[in-house]
Amino acid sequence: MERSGLRASSVVLAAMAMLLASLASAGAGFQSREEALDVLQKTNRLIEAAPNQAALYTLRGDAYYALNDLYGAMENYTAAIRLDDRQDDAYFGRGMVLGRMGRVDEGIADLDVYILRHPDSSVAYTKRGVRNIWRNNLAAAERDLVRAVELDPDNAEAHDDLGVVHAKHNRIGLAAKHFSTAIRLDPSYQKAYHNLAICFYVRGQPREALEIVDAGLQLDPDSRDSLFLKSTVLEALGRTDESRVLAERAEFLPESNWSERSETGSFSIQGRKK
């Protein structure tokens, strides 16, 4: 009986190793919802056979997070940490989830643990910086995002969020520089176009603002925030009828659902409906 149990445990560990290796070779994160569902099913079976393997709970937490099941993700990350406090990825994942759930301080505490153990992680500093923006601790956010850029100058998300911090301090020139860098590094980064357009608008350059916001709308034609921004810019250019039609269209679109990298929100436009 004991040998049979050992063989079963070995089979589970081998299956777990193969699953982790396949995900590592595919790169960070899941490439599709189907992939996340597949990993969820596999980890369910493996956990049933080996309920004390902490890494499986971390992996299942990642799958739940990718499927936007925040409570499922948090439960699994917590289970992983209880089984093995060395599950650094579980601390990172739970820090992300708690922030999304509005428990920002708790999320930052988990990211603190991860950063203490991984002081060279540009991504971790970026995510903590974003959450410091959420709680309006701009000094801490700036420290984190500056460090993120130092560690990885090609981190487009960090540049964009650092631009947000500069904009909140009314350092419009510096903000525009970082938004432009984010676009250069990642031309698909729609919110960076939105934010850069705001910089041109507040500097009294509506024509340039219109060009940039249009470039962003090519990436996401139904971005409610960017359509309202374009409406505001058109009004500043004296194109009142076009502005009104666009605002009416935007009014019926759903609220923006920025991705994690874009969730910090941009600084306000005077006169825009909230």
Image (cartoon, rainbow, N blue to C red):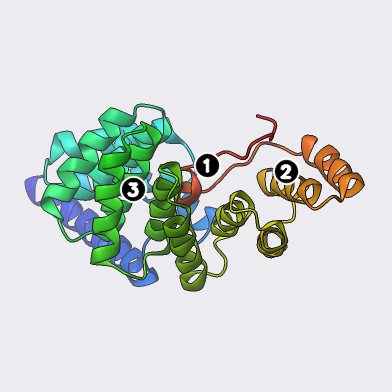
Dot placed on the residue nearer the N-terminal end, 2 or 3: 3
Q: Is residue 167 visible?
A: yes
Q: Which residue is farthest top?
A: 103
Which of label 2 and label 3 is nearer to you? 2
Q: Position of residue 218 (x, y in %)?
A: 72, 63
Disc sitting over residue 239 in the figure: none
Q: Position of residue 79 (x, y in %)?
A: 23, 34
Q: Residue at x 11, y 46 (%)?
A: 86
Which of label 3 and label 1 is nearer to you? 1
Q: Which quadrant of the structure image shows residue 106?
A: top left
* Residue type of the residue flagged with mark 1: Phe
Placement of the C terminus among the 4 image quadrants: top right
Mark 2–mark 3 Cα distance, whole angstroms, equals 27 Å
Disc sitting over residue 127 in the figure: 3
Residue that label 1 marks: 267
* Residue type of the residue flagged with mark 3: Lys
Exactly how many numbered labels are in the figure?
3
Indicate the secondary structure of the residue bearing disc 3: helix
Residue that label 2 marks: 228
Q: Residue at x 25, y 33 (%)?
A: 78
Dot placed on the residue nearer the N-terminal end, 3 or 1: 3
Q: Is residue 6 above or below residue 73?
A: below
Dot placed on the residue nearer the N-terminal end, 2 or 1: 2
Q: Residue at x 88, y 45 (%)?
A: 240
Q: Position of residue 215 (x, y in %)?
A: 68, 65
